[in-house]
Amino acid sequence: MDVRDFLEILHIAEKLKDTPRHCTTSEGRTESVAEHSWRLSLMAFLLQSEFPQADMGRVMRMCLIHDLGECFTGDIPTFVKTDRDRETEDSLLGKWVAGLPKEVSSEMRSLYAEMDAQKTTEARICKALDKLEALIQHNESPIGTWSENEYELNRTYAFDAAAFSPWLTQLRKAILEDTLEKIDTEGRRGPDA
C-alpha cells in the first residue's frame, strides 16, 4: 500500500477519536466511538477460546471497522437512529470504501456485506458484542448520566443478539444482574426520578 493512502485512511479514521458516543465512561467523561471500537475488538480477542469454530481474527477486523461510517455522520444512538440515517451513513461509507486501495476496499466490502447479512457466526458474534459492550459501558457509567429509556434498555436490549450462543447468553444475563444491582444500589437518578 502506498504510504500516502495509508496515512489518508488513518486521517479519516482518526475522526472516531473525536466522535462522541451517547455513553459516558466510569468517570463521567463522554466516550468516543474509537474507544468503543477498541474495547469491542478487545472483547473479541479475549473470547477466542470460547468460539474455537469461529475465525476470531475476522471478528476482530469487523469490530475495528464496524463504526467507520460514523466518521462521516457522527454517532446516532440506536434508539433514535432512523432508516434514513442508516442509508446516509451506508452511502457515505460506501463511497469512501470504494475509493480506498483495492486490497483494503475489497476486504472492507466483504466484511461489511457479511456483517449486514448476519448469516455467519463471525458476523453474529460481532453484532452481539457491539450491543453487549454498550450495555457494559452503561453499567460502568454514573447512573445520573442515563437517559430515562436506558433503565429499560439495560434490562431488555440484546438478548436476541446473544441468543445464538450459550456463552453470550450467560454474559447477557450477568450484565442484567449488574444493571439491577446498579439501579438498586445507586437508585434511579434519571431525569424523571
Image (spheres, helix red, strand yellow):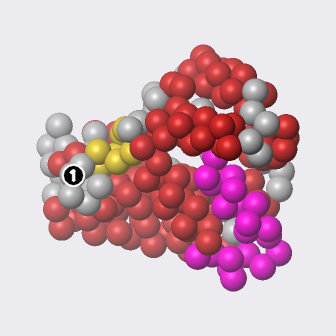
Magenta segment boundaries in residue numbering:
46-65
Q: Residue at x 26, y 60 (%)?
A: 26
Q: Residue at x 72, y 22 (%)?
A: 95
Task: Judge left or right: residue 36 versus residue 121.
Answer: left
Residue 182, x across and y down, in percent: 26, 64
Residue 115, x across and y down, in percent: 74, 46
- Between 73 and 136, the one lying in front of the other is 73
Magenta stretch: helix, strand or loop mostly: helix
Q: Is residue 135 visible?
A: yes
Position above or below: 98 against 84: below
User: Where the N terminus falls, by quadrant?
Assistant: top right
Q: Quadrant of residue 63 in the image?
A: bottom right
Residue 151, x across and y down, in percent: 32, 49
Residue 79, x across and y down, in percent: 46, 34
Q: Secondary structure at mark 1?
A: loop
Q: Residue at x 74, y 42 (%)?
A: 2
Task: Judge left or right: residue 87 versus residue 121.
Answer: left
Q: Which residue is mark 1?
A: 28
Give the amino acid at mark 1: Gly
- Between 74 and 180, the one lying in front of the other is 74
Return the residue found at the far bottom: 49
Q: Residues within 10 Å of mark 1 (few under 14, many from 20)?
A: some
Q: Is residue 81 visible?
A: no
Q: Residue at x 14, y 43 (%)?
A: 193
Q: Quadrant of residue 40 in the image?
A: bottom right
Residue 165 among those drawn in magenta:
no
